[in-house]
Amino acid sequence: MPRSLPPHPPPPDTMSNASSPVIAASCSRSWSVSEDSLRRYVTYASERCIQELLSASESSRAGGGDGWKVLAFQNGVEISKRSAGSLHVFRSRWLLRSVTPQQFIVVATAIDAAKQWDPDLVEAKHIKDLNDNLSIIGLRFGDSSKPLFKKREFIVYERRETLDDGTLVVAVASLPKEIAAGLQPKNNKAIRGLLLQSGWVVEKLEDDSCMLDPAGWLPKCFVNRLNTKLVMIIENLKKLAETCPMEKEM
């Protein structure tokens, strides 16, 4: 059966009632949001992101029924392809031997992944912790970053969940710009960037290994064979994970 989280009530309607006492919009298009409303909104949005990551992970497997076909399995990397007319899309799943999901997730935070995508990360901070597994994070890149990140800042949530079968999911995405502006005023020299749903689905395997389905800091892991930046990022994160202590189950 498909993996999923328990249903959660929908978030408060942050868009339709500008006179609400909970959310007040200013002429500068930033919203002042109550702690409770912010928590409910981000909880709901992050649950939807997790469900979509899980759904994409299920469909990309061989026989997943969404048109994906396995092309190769080499050095622990499974490459799949889906065709739509003349358009060919690639993505990957990674077998990380001798790395547990817990070890990988320790080093696969939004901040760690951002550093791997571009080392000119000039600021990374936790703006607010909403729950033990749900945080709002600010990321700002400098003048020396590559064009995709140059002078950009992102206000994102990061949600971590452990499913009943031991699968770990990390979901990261930008907050709506009005809410982000209310939480963290934009740096005058920065461009407020938008990160769509991204993250990791990490399945627990036997012998202290795991299977990684990345959608992280990315488009959803589109892979042109093995020659991508994502290959180097996952290799670097894997090396970091191998240095983390391995927790033994009781």
Image (spheres, rainbow, N blue to C red):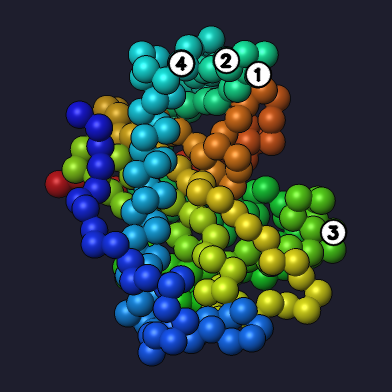
User: Where residue 105 sits in the image (x, y, percent)?
Assistant: 42, 49
Element marked by disc 4: loop
69 shown above or below 241:
above
* Alpha carbons under labels 3 and 1: distance apart: 33 Å
In percent of the image, x 69 and y 36: which residue is there? 229
Residue placed under numbered mark 1 in the picture: 87
Q: Residues within 10 Å of mark 4 (few under 14, many from 20)?
A: some
Q: Residues within 10 Å of mark 2 (few under 14, many from 20)?
A: few
The residue at which mark 4 appears reads as 67
Of the numbered discs 2 and 4, the one sitting upstream in the chain is: 4
**Left or right: residue 209 compared with residue 197:** left
First in sequence: mark 3 vs mark 1: 1
Q: Secondary structure at mark 1?
A: strand
Please say if the residues under marks 3 and 1 sit with CB atoms less than 8 Å apart.
Answer: no
Give residue 27's position: percent from left, percent from top. 64, 86
Q: Which quadrant of the figure has residue 138?
A: bottom right
Residue 144 circle label: 3
Whether tag 2 and tag 4 are in contact, CB under 8 A, the answer is yes
Residue 83: which numbered mark, if any? 2
Q: Which amino acid type is marked by label 3? A: Ser
Q: Secondary structure at mark 3?
A: loop
Residue 224, which numbered label? none
Mark closer to the observer (4, 3): 4
Contact, CB < 8 Å: mark 1 with mark 4?
A: no
Mark 4 vs 3, N-terminal side: 4
Q: Position of residue 115 (x, y in %)?
A: 65, 55
Q: Of 240 and 73, which appears nearest the observer?
A: 73
Q: What amino acid type is highlighted by mark number 2?
A: Ser
Q: Residue furthest left?
A: 250
